[in-house]
Amino acid sequence: MSEQAVQAIDGSEQAEAPKKTEGSSAKKAAGTRTVPKWETDARDRVRAAIRRYAKPLNDLVARDANEGDTRLLITDFLCAGLGYDKYDDLTTEYQVKGEFADYGIRIDKQLVAFIEVKRCSQKLNVKHLRQVQMYAVNEGVEWMILSNGQVWQAYHMTAGLPVVIDLALEVDLLSDTASLAAKTDALFYLTKEAFKRRLIDDLWRARAATSPKSLAQVLLSDVVADAIRKELRRQTNHNADVSEIHRILRGEVLRPETLL
């Protein structure tokens, strides 16, 4: 995105809202949400931090900086961009049964998330997720964040046997395909203000409800299978058996990983 385009976005977002006229509230479109000042301020702060740290982050990637240097940038971003107090909200090297999580996030003195940091050039993977998952399970924490400075991922853990892990959000700060607004929207959910109001929980529920696994379960339900049978009969005059529809959906239509 060019600097001119970014300035245009900022200008449109920061423009003064038109003054209300008599009867304007009655004419307001149904469902329009009034954005509270705390949210506007948080989004502005995140947007400014993405711009501010783009060059330092690019420099870290270019020189293949180590994990320690990456952690310095992430600490600054957590404070300047996401609104956490370095001393009150962040705990580094949080000890969990002899192991150490890179960060623990506290809100109102309550531990709400762990952050695992990897060097800026290292791609985040399942091994890293399992590492931070161990910390979360042992401490009863629902939220896990992975970051190499460039990519940020937030996962929700639902306790049980086995535990259920859902990816709630992922954002690449150096991506050329995502706009500044899209990056801001994603990272907003990791701000202290949004975490405190549990807005990320709403995001997770929405993502989980429409995940491939959730949709696969719906498609395999008896109600949907019977509806498919009726539609097939209407279109082809063939009265397929529901068990046969289930077999074909499982074996030939749906991806195997959605059936786990």
Image: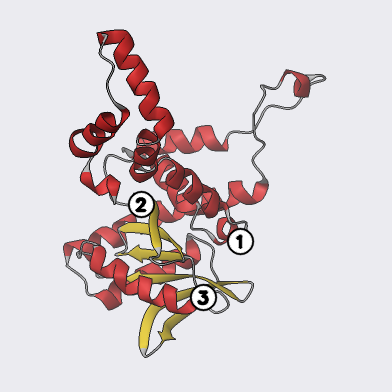
Residue 246: quarter of image: top left
Decide if residue 256 is in sight here.
yes
Residue 24, given in percent of the width and then of the height, sits at: 76, 21
Residue 214: quarter of image: top left
The residue wearing badge 3 is 86
The residue wearing badge 1 is 196
Residue 249, given in percent of the width and then of the height, sits at: 25, 34
Q: Residue at x 65, y 34 (%)?
A: 33
Q: Secondary structure at mark 3?
A: loop
Residue kind at label 1, given as amino acid type: Lys
Residue 192: quarter of image: bottom right
**Mark toward the start of the polypeptide (3 vs 1):** 3
Decide if residue 72 is in sight here.
no
Q: Residue furthest right?
A: 22
The figure's colour scheme reads secondary structure
Residue 149's place in the image compared with 72, above or below, is above
Residue kind at label 2, given as amino acid type: Glu
Residue 18, given in percent of the width and then of the height, sits at: 68, 27
Residue kind at label 3, given as amino acid type: Lys
Q: Residues within 10 Å of mark 1 (few under 14, many from 20)?
A: some
Checking the image for residue 170, the label placed there is 2
Residue 186, given in percent of the width and then of the height, sits at: 43, 48
Q: Residue at x 47, y 59 (%)?
A: 81
Q: Residues within 10 Å of mark 2 (few under 14, many from 20)?
A: some
**Mark toward the start of the polypeptide (3 vs 2):** 3
Residue 145's place in the image compared with 37, above or below, is below
Q: CA distance from mark 2 to mark 1?
A: 20 Å
Q: Is residue 86 left or right of residue 228?
A: right
**Mark toward the start of the polypeptide (2 vs 1):** 2
Q: Nearer the viewer, residue 239 or 217?
A: 239
Question: Do the CB atoms of the residues marked 2 and 1 lie less than 8 Å apart?
Answer: no
